């Protein structure tokens, strides 16, 4: 027999003799309408895109998510460089499936295809609003499935969940997290199907869809759904055997669902395992004042849990323990679950459990939407059991007042929060009082007036909270301009110069966002992702590259030697982005320079020897195979003309806190480069040989957070004496071997030799996962592919069997014995085979269950026919 949930006590509608509620459809539509109105109105109030001049592309939204959606647009329209396996536009060749699974597997992401390419920001905004609205609809649907009640109350609470503080403060610009916001009520609904023995196949598919859309937040939603299921199982009046059967069915359902998603989840997992470590903050719980403050409207903070659900939801949730119409077990169970999960966010071990045992980079409270969901569900149980009596209302009002008193000591509660909170509290209390009245008020039904009052309260405080969060983010985070003339000029210049795969076209050192190649095209070193490989990050750093976000956001490196190494034959030069105002504008426009470079696959006489050292100039020469730099002895003088002080920390070199000069002697006509990873400001070569170049360095005062890339400053004057003027923006450090003088004649000779011995033809498959190169007869030594040797590359020379690729100082390498004239390298994302095997096994088990179920139903029909 199928386990069943016992019938619930009669609802307020039954007691009052009202008609049954219209159903979940109307509730879902109401939640959608409220959510969309609030989000658009808040952006209009904040004058944020697309309803105002302020960009909404803050932090990773502008640096990662919009560019990744732009790349998806290109792939869907057949315009991207690379395919599902390898993204050749970023990081000189990176695994794309982990990024796809992290940022782009939500079904909503496909909507970018219907928007014009230059409206990618609008596409992402529409997707964001649709996701939040669908989360509200899913919650409204769940609430009416948990308990019958007023449809408009379910719709209102569904919108409260969708517009919770976590959504408005954190997830609205991390739009892939919003799939978890949708998944949580859907997974709870799967639990209800399991309890009633219905829709087993659909339940598995819902779990699979949730884990594919965004497995990170789906993991949190799954934990939350499991807690809700266990509570519902405890509240159900079922024999022990049926409870165990339901629990077993739940475990099988979720295991099969996650198993079907394994091909993508395992790829994402192994992509993270091979990624650069990044910069992680040590967890520290927030104080009670800040914790309670985030329950109030219009509070904002990056480092505390945004628990706001609206006073219309918070008051009923606070009233549940005192609502005598609800059974004691219901009151105790849901109250303890809310408190327990809230406290679990504040304890280190359970904090790690919620984040899959990996300390998050950035915000520490990404599981906050779970508490918001439980608060809303608790509020629904309060309202669904009938009107609140005076005792329950007074207790809820007292608890709300206590929360406000404690929260008043927090700096997160700003002056403008109190008028919003007091207005919302009065409105919500009046609405709940009206729900308990039976006589008409102002010739209208009390329920109708209560609905209007509660709806107005929810819309008002949610709009204010969203607008405040949008405005506050501008003062706390970097922001980036939406698609405009600058990006279009970059894209046009790249399209005209593009020659892939004969050579790469780098979008340029002066980037607009952290993933310029994905947004404007080309094939560069620049790359920002949670899956930025450790091998490429360390290789580029050793060559003088710069990065932010602890090594996960790599920057372009404008250097003649690395252009030769990585076959960068064209490079776009742009002025500094005026939106950032980091450096003054120099009045120049877009330009493209071209260089004669070797092909993507070259032949070196022997395998890699030695290892990278502290000097990026010598490391470049190690990869190139020839000495091309002179490293002069430098003298650093401060603004008073005296020797600068030595650094006293681990950043070796001399300190520069004000104007300073660097002097050195090099061969006339050689190119001057400055490597100062811990320097912030500008550097300019004195004299006409600078050719208008200014080095712009963007190091950060915090170690291991941001380092500056090597910069080209001009050529050595005829006198052989060079002077570099430094204009720091903060205290920095210049290393002892900061200056390198490049002999361009030697470099050109190396290029001619590499071209003569390199591949005559290089092709890259449409999926991007296979590189083929035709080599001169008798090639010996090692073939080097100008791509980072990330995990997953397998190569073969001639007709030999493929084997894991060798490494040539961080690049893909294939040994040659003089007999092969062809090299083939194919990329297999780590974890894909394992995930496919697990997924295939889950599919087989699911099919077996389907066959057994069909056979059982056929036998049952036969028995009924005989009877």
Image (tube, grey):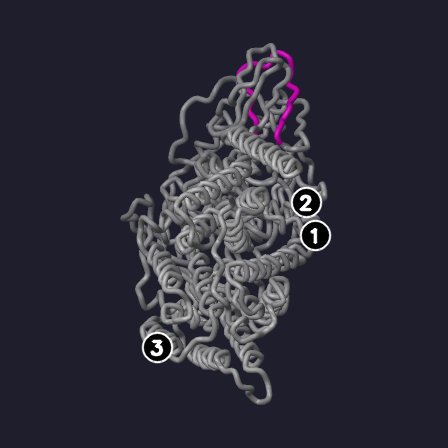
Q: Is residue 633 above or below residue 697?
A: above
Which numbered dot is residue 117? 1
Image point 58% across, 66% down: which residue? 31
Q: Nearer the viewer, residue 249 or 643?
A: 249
Q: CB of mark 1 within 8 Å of CB of mark 2?
A: yes
Q: Position of residue 673 (x, y in %)?
A: 48, 42
Q: Position of residue 216 (x, y in %)?
A: 48, 47
Q: Residue furthest front?
A: 867
In the image as oriented, which residue stretches furthest toward the bottom? 442
- State the SS at label 1: helix
Image coords of residue 523 (percent x, y): 61, 40
Residue 222 is left or right of residue 108, and the answer is left
Q: Is residue 370 magenta?
A: no
In the image, taking residue 551 as reference, residue 448 lies left or right, namely right
Q: Quadrant of residue 116?
A: bottom right
Residue 757 vs 832, above or below: the answer is: above
Between disc 1 and disc 2, whose residue precedes?
A: 2
Tell me the magenta residue range: 769-786
Q: Which residue is mark 2?
A: 74
Q: Which residue is mark 3?
A: 398
Q: Residues within 10 Å of mark 3 (few under 14, many from 20)?
A: some
Report the predominant secondary structure element of the magenta stretch: strand
Does residue 280 appear to the left or right of 555 in the view shown?
Answer: left
Q: In this picture, is 380 found above or below 77?
A: below
């Amino acid at each position: 027999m199928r386990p069943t949930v016992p019938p619930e006590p009669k609802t307020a509608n039954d007691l009052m003799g009202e008609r049954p509620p219209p159903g979940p459809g109307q509730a879902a539509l109401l939640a959608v309408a409220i959510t969309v109105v609030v989000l658009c109105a808040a952006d209009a109030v904040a004058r944020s895109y697309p309803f105002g001049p302020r960009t909404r592309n803050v932090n990773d939204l502008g640096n990662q998510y919009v560019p990744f959606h732009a790349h998806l647009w290109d792939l869907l329209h057949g315009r991207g460089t690379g395919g599902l396996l390898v993204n050749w536009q970023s990081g000189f060749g990176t695994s794309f499936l982990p990024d796809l699974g992290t940022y782009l597997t939500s079904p909503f992401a496909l909507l970018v295809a219907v928007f014009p390419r230059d409206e990618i920001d609008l596409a992402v905004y529409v997707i964001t609003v649709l996701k939040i609205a669908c989360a509200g609809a899913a919650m409204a649907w769940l609430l009416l499935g948990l308990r019958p009640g007023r449809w408009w109350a379910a719709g209102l609470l569904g919108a409260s969940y969708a517009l919770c503080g976590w959504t408005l403060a954190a997830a609205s610009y991390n739009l892939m997290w919003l799939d978890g916001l949708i998944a949580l009520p859907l997974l709870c609904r799967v639990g209800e199907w399991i309890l009633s023995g219905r829709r087993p196949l659909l339940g598995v598919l819902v779990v699979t869809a949730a884990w594919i859309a965004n497995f990170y937040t789906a993991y949190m939603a799954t934990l939350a759904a499991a807690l809700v299921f266990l509570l519902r199982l405890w509240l159900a009046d079922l024999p022990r055997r049926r409870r165990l059967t339901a629990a077993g069915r739940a475990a099988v359902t979720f295991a099969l669902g996650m198993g079907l998603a394994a091909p993508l989840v395992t790829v994402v997992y192994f992509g993270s395992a091979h990624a650069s470590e990044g910069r992680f903050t040590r967890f520290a719980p927030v104080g009670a004042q800040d914790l309670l403050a985030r329950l109030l409207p219009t509070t904002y903070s990056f480092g505390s849990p945004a628990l706001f659900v609206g006073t219309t939801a918070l008051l009923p949730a606070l009233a549940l323990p005192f609502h005598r119409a609800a059974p004691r077990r219901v009151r105790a169970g849901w109250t303890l679950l809310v408190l327990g999960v809230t406290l679990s966010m504040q304890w280190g071990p359970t904090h790690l459990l919620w984040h899959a045992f990996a300390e998050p980079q950035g915000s520490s409270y990404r599981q906050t939407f779970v508490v918001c969901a439980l608060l809303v569900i608790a509020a629904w149980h309060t309202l669904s059991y009938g009107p609140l009596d005076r005792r329950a209302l007074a207790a809820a009002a007292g608890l709300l007042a206590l929360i406000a008193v404690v929260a008043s000591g927090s700096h997160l509660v700003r002056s403008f929060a109190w008028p919003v909170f007091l207005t919302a509290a009065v409105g919500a209390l009046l609405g709940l009082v009206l729900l308990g009245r039976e006589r008409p008020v102002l010739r209208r039904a009390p329920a109708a007036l209560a609905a209007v009052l509660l709806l107005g309260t929810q819309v008002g405080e949610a709009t204010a909270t969203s607008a405040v969060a949008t405005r506050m983010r501008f003062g706390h985070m970097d922001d980036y301009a939406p698609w405009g003339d600058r990006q279009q000029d970059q894209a046009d210049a790249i399209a005209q110069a593009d020659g892939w795969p004969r050579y790469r076209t780098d979008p340029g050192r002066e980037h607009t966002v952290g993933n310029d190649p994905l947004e404007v095209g080309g094939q560069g070193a620049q790359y920002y992702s949670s899956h930025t490989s450790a091998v490429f990050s360390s290789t580029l750093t050793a060559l003088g590259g710069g990065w932010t976000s602890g090594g996960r956001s790599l920057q372009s490196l404008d250097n003649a030697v690395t252009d030769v190494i990585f076959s960068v034959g064209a490079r776009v030069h742009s002025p500094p982005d005026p939106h950032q105002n980091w450096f003054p504008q120099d009045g120049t426009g877009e330009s493209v320079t071209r260089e004669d470079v070797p092909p993507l696959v070259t032949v070196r006489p022997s395998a890699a020897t030695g290892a990278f050292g502290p000097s990026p100039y010598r490391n470049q020469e190690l990869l190139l195979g020839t000495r091309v730099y002179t490293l002069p002895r430098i003298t650093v003088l401060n603004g008073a003309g005296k020797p600068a002080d030595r650094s006293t920390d681990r950043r070796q070199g001399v300190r520069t806190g004000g104007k300073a000069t660097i002097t050195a002697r090099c061969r006339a006509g050689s190119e001057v480069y400055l490597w100062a990873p811990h320097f912030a400001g500008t550097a300019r070569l004195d004299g006409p040989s600078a050719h208008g170049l200014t080095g712009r360095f963007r190091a950060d005062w915090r170690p291991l957070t941001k380092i500056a890339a090597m910069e080209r400053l001009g050529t050595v004057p005829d006198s052989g004496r060079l002077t570099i003027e430094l204009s720091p923006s903060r205290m920095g450090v210049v290393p002892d071997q900061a200056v390198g003088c490049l002999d361009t004649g030697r470099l050109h000779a190396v290029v001619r030799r590499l071209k003569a011995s390199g591949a005559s033809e290089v092709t890259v498959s449409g999926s991007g996962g296979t590189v083929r190169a035709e080599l001169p007869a008798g090639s010996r030594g090692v073939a080097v592919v100008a791509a980072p040797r990330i995990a997953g590359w397998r190569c073969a020379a001639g007709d030999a069997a493929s084997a894991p690729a060798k490494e040539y100082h961080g690049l893909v390498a294939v040994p040659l014995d003089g007999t092969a004239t062809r090299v083939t390298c194919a990329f297999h994302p780590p974890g894909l085979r394992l995930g496919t095997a697990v997924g295939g096994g889950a599919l087989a088990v699911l099919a077996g269950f389907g066959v057994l179920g069909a056979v059982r139903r056929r036998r049952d029909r036969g028995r009924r026919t005989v009877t």
